[in-house]
Amino acid sequence: MVKHLYSNLKREFKNHLFDYLFLITAGIFFLILLNIFRGERIIEFIILISFAFFYIVWGIYHHIIDETLHLKTVIEYILIAFIIIFLLKIIILP
Amino acid sequence: MEKIKTFIHRLFIPHEENNFRAKSLHTDFLTVYLIIAFLMMILFKQGNIHNVLGFATDISVDKLYQLTNEERQKNNLPPLSLNSALSLAAQRKAENMLTENYWSHYSPDGKTPWDFISGAGYKYEYAGENLAKNFLFSSGVVDAWMNSTTHRGNILKKEYTEVGYAIVNGTLNGEQTTLVVQEFGKPMASAFTPSEIQASETIQNIPAIPKAKYTAPVQPKINALSFSFNLNVIFMVFLIMVLILDFYFASKFNIIRIGGKNTAHLLFIIFILIGLFMSTIGTII
């Protein structure tokens, strides 16, 4: 199962190398910013919101490029992003 | 039994009955998760799990005291008793750090930890201090201290017999934080005359106030936070698991469907989880 998962993940990343590199870079940037502003809860919240919105925009961009954009897909990205925001708001955010 | 099997099958494995996507990832299910997350947020806000500064922490004197003594017992050392004079010294030290805006054992105007301990009326034969900030949980504080040689040395010092704590919220260098101050001491025996006073082991004495009279300083009362934190981590792990399963079966059965990319969702959640754990890491000196 792991081998199969690995080869499919590899294929997916290979097919959309630029898109995933873009997302990973943004993710690393998000972690660096969180580390810089650690303890400053309002800035942490702004960083999280920005990353979540970036993720939604990334999703739309990726599916436009992939020619698979659909309203259902956009809603899925928005729902996942907001679920995470609400969950984190309980723990660490103002 | 067959119904449960079918239900789980629909919930996690993409096939024709769930429109080739795990039911737990359908937009209606995601909407339910969103509503639950939103209600939880409101509930915990109403339950006042956030302190006055608007950020949550689950550090308590009782837990710190319990964990410190557990560490001592693991090393065959007698437990420390809680002393209100040391707690008062800790409280004043924390407030002084916030007022004078410094993060150090020594204040910019030269006040030492021993000044705060003596100032609280505790005459000691031995005394020591551990500091921590930005932690979310008591266990994180004690673990960090135990992983540092000097702080561990304080916790496991056989000469200490008493301890005091303060947990104070405030703004330090423009950063909203929770300061934790732990003061150790051994009261000076009345007949004892110090021959030498050192920076970390000094001398004096005050009768220890019985533990029964101790009242903990005002602190965030937020045991719900651990529950909420664990619940959130469990939920995110559940989402990761569902995404992996859905991705695995969709690629195994060569399913082509309309929907978001599981790999992207996975990356997003993993980055968020790393960020969440990063924000629970505090600093000690």
Image (cartoon, coloured by chain):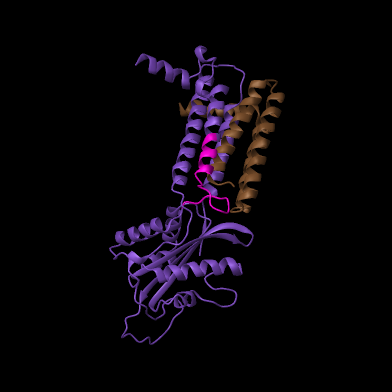
Chain colours: A brown, B purple
Is residue B168 rendered to the left or right of residue B70? right
Q: Which of B199 and B184 is in front in this view?
A: B184
Asked whether residue A5 is drawn in magenta, I would say no
Q: Is residue B126 above or below residue A4?
A: below
Where residue B238 sits: x, y (%)? 47, 32
Magenta stretch: helix, strand or loop mostly: loop
Q: Nearer the viewer, residue B271 or B193?
A: B193
State how many labels appear. Answer: 0
Q: Was residue B48 drawn as part of the magenta stretch in this picture?
A: yes
Note whether residue B140 is visible: yes
Q: Residue at x 47, y 68 (%)?
A: B90
Q: Position of residue B131 (x, y in %)?
A: 49, 64
Which span is picked out in magenta? Answer: B39-58
Residue B219, percent from left and from top: 48, 57
Name above or below for residue B237 compared with residue B78. above
Q: Can residue B80 be seen in this view?
A: no
Work out which quarter of the rendered image holds the N terminus of chain A and state it: top left
In terms of image quadrants, where is residue B74? bottom left
Q: Horizontal placement of B209 versus A9: left or right?
A: left
Residue at x 57%, y 40% (from the top left corner): B271
Residue at the location (59% across, 77% down)? B109
Q: Where is residue B155 in the image (x, y as percent from the top left)?
A: 38, 65
Q: Residue at x 46, y 71 (%)?
A: B89
Q: Is residue B260 above or below residue B151?
A: above
Q: Residue furthest top?
A: B16
Side of A3 where B155 appears, left or right: left
